[in-house]
Amino acid sequence: MDQAERLRNIIKKQDFKADHERVAKVITVTSGKGGVGKTSLSVNLAIQLGRLGKRVVVFDADFGLANIEIMLGIRPKYNLADLMYRGKSIEDIITYGPENIGFISGGSGINELANLTRDQVFSMVHRLGDLDRIADVVIVDTGAGISDTVLEFVAASEEVLLVATPEPTSITDAYALLKTLNKKASYRPEKTVVKMVANQVRGESEAAELFEKLGIVVEKFLDIKVEFLGSVPYNRNMQRAIMRQAPVSISDPESDSARAVKNIARCLEDVMTKKADKGGIVKLFSSVIRMRFMK
């Protein structure tokens, strides 16, 4: 029996559940291609939600890269592998950045899960479940594009923010991501809410046009409903902030871009007060594990 088969047998016998009533709101941020400002949105959204009184942790699921830590200019001491293999707690692997926003480096990612023993799998999910106690909101920043890992996190999520720009390739790639997602057997459109954020737009009319372009083809050809969450205007200060490793919500809090992200955070907060997350981080990761190894 190979390692993957052994893990499949473990998963079949286990029903992973949070061991406490309150669970964190999980928001997965994704995009069809790189360079659309996905990670910048994740970081600034975390800061704005923090200012609304939420305890926020960003999980960097762009495995193998280090986009969050590069953007914040902070190098974490530990990552997910330290929790998986070296007995570190969830508190140990959270690094705190500006305004007490926590982030977790995914390290080499979930590909190493097949090497875990039964006890290590249970321990990992249980420790990740501690995020439900530590955080009110967990923002999962996926990789860009249509990799298996990106699709697994998106399909496992109850709320997904899809970031796109007016650039034609961004719209095409966003549609390709949704089209591929729609074909996954594990995807349940009734359980996953997809909300589009129009980024780097030059006015509300361009944002509306972008959403219309994507929405028309999605509604016509796919069994997916996409909602419009909001837009973030193009702003040179945003690009400068990225270069300086200082989120625009901190470096230029009164800019149009920062205020736009603040409005998006308020919209998400309104949803949180009306509808509680059902599964939290335990449900997310257990679903991802099942998708990865129950094929």
Image: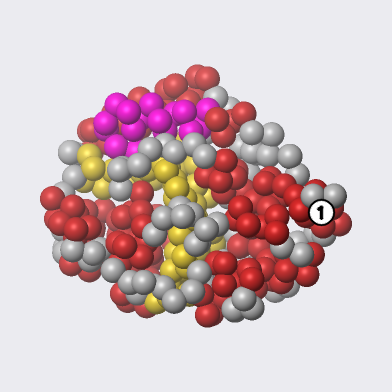
Query: Does 172 appear in magenta?
Result: yes
**Visible residue check, residue 192:** no
Q: Nearer the viewer, residue 143 or 276?
A: 143
Residue beneath the point at 64% across and 33% down: 184
Q: Is residue 35 left or right of residue 22?
A: left
Which residue does the numbered mark 1 point to in the structure image?
6
Choose between 202 and 88: the one closer to the eye: 88
Residue 119 in the image: state x and y as whole percent. Answer: 78, 70
Q: Is residue 4 visible?
A: yes
| Above-or-below relation of 89 to 167 | below
Within-10-Å neighbours for mark 1: few <14, some 14–19, many 20+: some
Whole-percent x, y for residue 223 in the image: 58, 27
Asked where in the image residue 224 lies, by quadrant, the reply is top right
Mark 1 lies on a secondary structure that is helix
> Would residue 243 be found to the left or right of residue 97 on screen?
left
Q: Amino acid at mark 1?
A: Arg
- Secondary structure of the magenta portion, mostly? helix
Please identify the quarter of the rendering in which residue 196 is found.
Answer: top left
Q: Magenta region: which residues?
A: 164-179
